[in-house]
Amino acid sequence: MTPQDQEFINIAGQQYGDCMRACVASLLDLPIAEVPHFLRDADGDPQKFWSGVLEFTKARGWDYLSAFPEHRPEFAEAMGGYHIMGGPSPRGGGLLHAVIGKDGQIVFDPHPSKAGLDGDLAEWDFDYLVPL
């Protein structure tokens, strides 16, 4: 895992943040410039966003999986314990944010604030890249 900071922060109505782009780049040890800005490319459409993430990761031999709590340990093994954690942004406004976790703990936040996620850990998403 090579930490990559996001290049763009969310500015309502003007610019989409690229935290997921930074997290995928970090987990795949890629420079952020080699990863698409999924949210901007999808113009904020969640279905297009997730299609873009899946298309990109699968083209590189990885599947992107969300795990129920009971399956997290087996998926974590595939990435040496690293995973993407998603949840409410501490900056508010109903925004979601993505960070890198390891074994269920935040280890890297690509946002300049480094403020992590807000809310309850039990409600955050745990997502894994696993080899195809």
Image: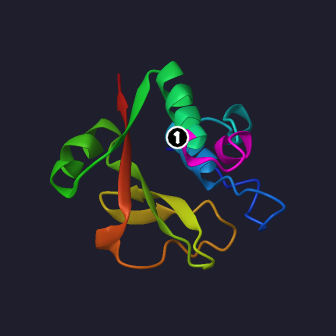
User: Against 87, is 46 above or below?
Assistant: above
Residue 94 part of the magenta segment: no
> Would you say residue 103 is visible in this rendering?
yes
Q: Which residue is drawn at 55% across and 65% down?
A: 96
Drawn side of residue 30 relative to residue 112, left or right: left
User: Against 56, is 50 above or below?
Assistant: below
Indicate the secondary structure of the residue bearing disc 1: helix
Identify residue for label 1.
50
Residue 81: x, y in percent? 32, 48
Residue 71: x, y in percent? 18, 48
Drawn side of residue 90 relative to residue 80, left or right: right
> Would you say residue 29 is visible in this rendering?
no
Residue 129: x, y in percent? 40, 37
Image quadrant where one finds the C terminus: top left
Drawn side of residue 74 relative to residue 26, left or right: left
Q: Mark 1, residues whose alpha carbon is within 10 Å: few (<14), some, or many (≥20)?
A: some
- Which contiguous range is marked in magenta? 38-47
Q: Which residue is drawn at 23% across and 50% down?
A: 72
Scheme by which the image is coloured: rainbow
User: Against 54, is 72 above or below?
Assistant: below
Q: Which of 61 and 65 is in front in this view?
A: 65
Dot 1 amino acid type: Trp
